[in-house]
Amino acid sequence: MKKTKKTSPRKPALSRGRKPLPAPVERAGDPEVTAKLAASYGLNAVEYKKVLGIMGRLPTHTELGIFSVMWSEHCSYKTSKPHLRASPPRASG
């Protein structure tokens, strides 16, 4: 019988020993990326810290927007997932 290797959940890039991504090219007119800006885009403090861990640096304004869209309620169902998991997996009848 073949043994399967146990894998742990994926960790942010820096905790896996990777180097941070290179510094991005700043675009004139982009606002400074801060936790306050991230919150205005719908990312909570935990999510913003996760972005920083994944990137290994401050994201650009564009990158922050991409994370915001990817993790938005519309795309990821952040608040409805627990309710959906409590529902029966199939319709009865």
Image (spheres, rainbow, N blue to C red):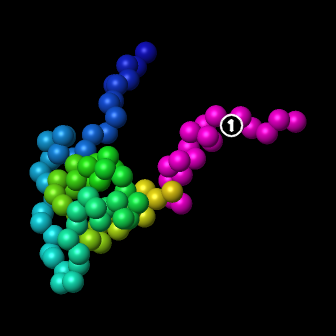
Q: x%, y% of residue 41? A: 38, 65
Work out whether 40 lies above or below 10. Answer: below
| Residue at 28% in and 61% down | 36
- The residue carrying mark 1 is 87
What is the quadrant of residue 3 in the picture?
A: top left
Left or right: 75 as drawn, with respect to 53: right
Which residue occupies 87% across, 36% down?
93
Q: Is residue 26 magenta?
A: no
Q: Is residue 41 above or below residue 28?
A: above
Residue 18 position, x and y percent, is 15, 47
**Looking at the image, which is closer to me, 7 or 68?**
68
Q: Nearer the viewer, residue 70 or 33?
A: 33
Q: Does residue 91 appear left or right of residue 11 in this picture?
A: right
* Range of residues picked out in magenta: 74-93
Residue appearing at x 27%, y 40% in the figure: 11
- The residue at 35%/68% (across/down) is 65
Residue 53 x, y percent position in the rendering: 22, 49
Q: Is residue 54 visible?
A: no
**Membership of 77 in magenta stretch:** yes
The x and y percentages for residue 1 are 43, 15
Using the rendered view, name the quadrant where residue 12 is placed: top left
Amino acid type at circle 1 is Ser
Q: Secondary structure at mark 1?
A: loop
Q: Is residue 91 visible?
A: yes
Q: Is residue 6 above or below residue 57?
A: above
* Residue at the farthest top position: 1
